Image (cartoon, helix red, strand yellow):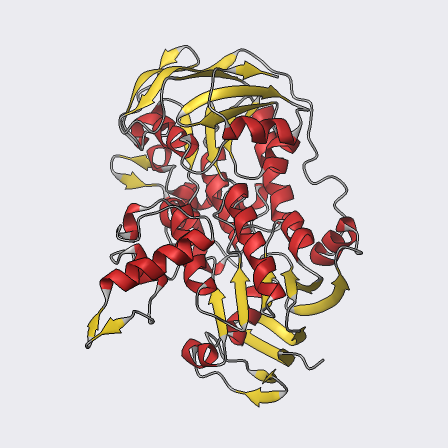
Amino acid sequence: MTAIVRMEGISKVFPGVVALDGVDFELQPGEIHALAGENGSGKSTLVKILYGALQPDRGTILVDGEPVVFAGPRTAIEHGIVAISQELTLAPSLTVAENVLMGRLPRRGGMIDWAKTNRRASAALEDLGVEVDPRRRLSELPLELQQEVEVARAVSANSRVLILDEATSALSERATDRLLERLAILRDRGVAIVFISHRLREIYRCSSRVTVLRDGRLIGTAPIPESPEQRLVQMMVGREISDLFNKREIDKREPVLRVRALTTEDGSMLDASFEVCAGEIVGVAGLVGCGKNELALALGGALPATGEVEVKGKRADLRTPARAIGSGISLVPDDRKRNAILPTRSVQDNLSAAWMGRLTRFGLINTREERRLASGAVSRFSVKTSSLSARIVQLSGGNQQKVVLGRWFALSPDVVVLSEPTRGIDVGAKSEVYRLIQDMAESGAGILMISSEMPELLGLCDRILVVSQGRITAEFLAGAAEEEIAHAAFAAGSVAVA
């Protein structure tokens, strides 16, 4: 069978970095072919070349056996190649329908047929099980729904080749399940799919082959599911990771965080009451829109709320993020690129952004101390960067996240609220982030961790709270079955402890 796409000897060099070095890649019709590797391995660069967003320095792309040159994404689309990136490419000021049918808006008499536009968009969204009014402005939707709109746009484009570059990173497990089911249907129709994900079980669930890149080089292609997961991880990181979570036994101390009847002003979280002890990691699970992310924002002072919150027995002031920090609560938000990093600033600036109170005296910043602390944080948290002055966007996603975590961890807060702390980072970086989280707990902090990845919650947390329809409806101890927690997330009711 002739490959629908074949990439031969693809090389790409950026200033000071060899992103790809003679990589070959082949994609068959009716195949879901995974690309795996750590952040910075070259996966995204390879697929950007495939859909015309980048030009290779060397190498050849063949479509149906014929050499092609993609001058840009439009040329790739003309060949039936459509991509979904982890970086949203939507227009926030437009409606959902306009985004789903961008470039394909139906017309009648030279004018846009809005009734048909909304119907077609609704059908594309319903095909993925997404319930949203197509007339709503995209900017009004939470991040996950925006990602699902992007997926609907690509899937509805009748493509021959569909590229998903971390398209599931912002999706819940339920939404991911719907997408993977849809991909299987497209595969059976003959669509060729390139699937990039840091969630290994997604790769094993949907793919027939996986190609592994490391440091811009092709390591190999292996069949799925015949290749053991441990072998795949070793190919990706170049070393053996025997225990991804490496959960430690940490002595639990007195409650460091007490929450009583916390209710957000918008009603997304209702009457939340719980405690977190020093040295304890408490997970929070739930479906999209259940209120778990709003709980994190409220505790971080970013969402108005009523109720009583105490840190080490003292009433916490959550009226602003700065006051929450002053009360001993640090928040790491779920959307790293929008809410956690300063993209135009350096690694040092991003680290020290939360330290100004300690570094400033009489209105002057102690730059020598700032550099000393930043250098220490880079070393302590194993941040891979060419220098402290490098822009943070030049770092891989995993290293960006370690900078964000290091910023707060260096303050030694009493309570750390983590919202999706490993979203969009590779398995090697995840292992390091898990170590950092446990280091914080071991130092005496109370950790509240909101995550959409159930294996992460089960592997790292001492207890798991389940949020459903704005309320904490269940609590599970370590060792609970994943099926029990998932069932509790779907059902609202009185609090149960298992």
Q: Residue at x 33, y 46 (%)?
A: 141
Measured from the top left, where is residue 149 in percent x and y? Answer: 39, 55
- Which one is nearer the viewer's eye here, 441 or 492? 492
Q: Residue at x 44, y 68 (%)?
A: 157
Measured from the top left, where is residue 51 in percent x and y? Answer: 50, 74
* Left or right of residue 192: residue 472: left
Q: Please indicate, yes or no, whether residue 146 appears anywhere in the rendered image.
A: yes
Q: Please indicate, yes or no, whether residue 375 appears anywhere in the rendered image.
A: no
Quick check: 176 above or below 300? Answer: below
- Which one is nearer the viewer's eye here, 325 or 73? 73
In what quadrant of the picture does the C terminus appear? top right
- Location of residue 57 (image quadrant): bottom right
* Left or right of residue 135: residue 252: right
In what quadrant of the picture does the N terminus appear? bottom right
- Which one is nearer the viewer's eye here, 374 or 261? 261
Q: Residue at x 44, y 84 (%)?
A: 71
Measured from the top left, where is residue 482 in percent x and y? Answer: 64, 31
